[in-house]
Image (cartoon, helix red, strand yellow):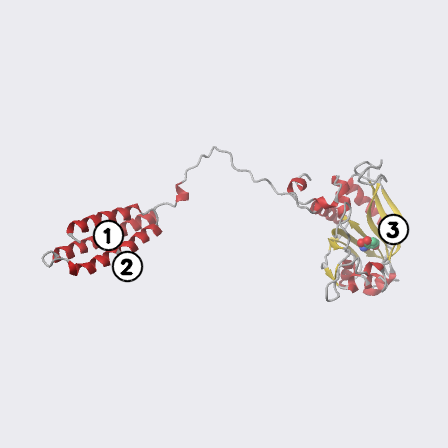
Amino acid sequence: MNIKNITEIQDQALQEVEAASDADALEAVRIRYLGRKGLLPDLMKQLKDVEPAQRPEAGKRLNELKNAFQERFEARKTELEKAPSPADKTTFDVTLPGSWRGLGKKHPITQLMERAIEIFHSLGFTVADGPDIETAFHNFDALNHPPGHPARDETDTFYLSDGDLLRTHTSPVQVRYMLAHKPPVRIIAPGRCYRRDTPDATHSANFHQIEGLYVDRQVSLADLKGDLTHFAHEAMGPKTKVRFRPHFFPFTEPSVEVDFSCHVCAGDGCRVCKQSGWIEIAGAGIVDPNVFEAVGYDTREVTGYAFGMGLERMAMVLFGITDIRHLYENDLRYLGQF
Ligand code: DAH
């Protein structure tokens, strides 16, 4: 080590401090020179090997190096702290077009559900809901399903290990609501349902229904027909025809199935309605007295109608969707059309 050496090292060190472009780089320079294993402590150790005549001068120069370094280091540090971050420095051309990320859309089922809620709201219905995981009591027993009823079968219903199940329809919400509220009742209950169906163009193991329940003095089948016909006209268009066919459900007597004329072909027959001109939309009927007894309503005081409509069917006809699976494949290019 000699004096000339120290001067060179100092020049180099100060240059590096100046070149450090951020706090991390600057700290790395400091460690390289002043750190415990850095260059300067190392030079200090070598002082004892310097010729005695030159030692005081070398020691003085080393101290100067250290001070100069520290001074420049602090100055650079303050400078970097004040400097704008690289992001602030970027200038951009305000006349360039922005990047368009596209607007989100509601899923067709959500659109239809919201519209249905709106229509029934105008008829005085409020929205009720219940859990997707149901007890057999709410899903079957209270709805007058006898013990051996085929709908209870494991081949049709998803059971959980504790005996509860994924609701197979929205009808258990009727039971829950009536157990908690006295009549009169006027509710709809939209929601998800689950059945062990093999998926194909018109079946999905997971689908949506809207349940309706109207209980008061002297509610009749005429009220049901009037309200569902009004709904069909509002939801599907004023030309929609509505047809009621006798049917059977354990929880209604009499029971009907409700068909809407096909929206796609206006009743002429097409692929969507399988050439019949009609689409089966809902099951409905007059609430069976056994259901009222299960929830503690007085069957001499009140009567009621109930219905359960399939939302997927309606969405398919309304939007011209030919395969129910398209609704659940989450292809945004497809779903974005509606
Ligand atoms: N829960 C029935 C189903 O999923 C539909 C239904 C029929 C609901 C008659 C009702 C009703 O409320 O009264 O097939």
Which residue is tagged 2?
37
Q: Is residue 87 left or right of residue 258?
A: left
In three-dimensional space, the C-alpha distance between marks 3 and 1, rounded to whole angstroms, equals 93 Å
Q: Nearer the viewer, mark 3 or mark 1?
A: 1
> Which residue occupies the extreme top position in the image?
95
Asked if the residues shown at circle 2 and circle 3 are in contact, with their CB atoms under 8 angstroms apart, the answer is no
| Front-lying residue, 271 or 141 | 271
Q: With respect to residue 148, does 75 lie above or below?
A: above
Q: Amino acid at mark 1?
A: Phe
| Label 3 secondary element | strand
Residue drawn at (85%, 38%) of the image: 275
| Front-lying residue, 86 or 125 | 86
Q: Is residue 64 left or right of residue 75?
A: left
Q: Residue 67 at what x, y percent from top left? A: 21, 54
Residue 256: mark: 3
Residue drawn at (20%, 53%) of the image: 65
Where is residue 51, by image quadrant?
bottom left
Looking at marks 2 and 1 on the same chain, the residue that comes earlier in the sequence is marked by: 2
Looking at marks 3 and 1 on the same chain, the residue that comes earlier in the sequence is marked by: 1
Q: Amino acid at mark 3?
A: Val
| Front-lying residue, 23 or 236 | 23
Asked if the residues shown at circle 2 and circle 1 are in contact, with their CB atoms under 8 angstroms apart, the answer is no
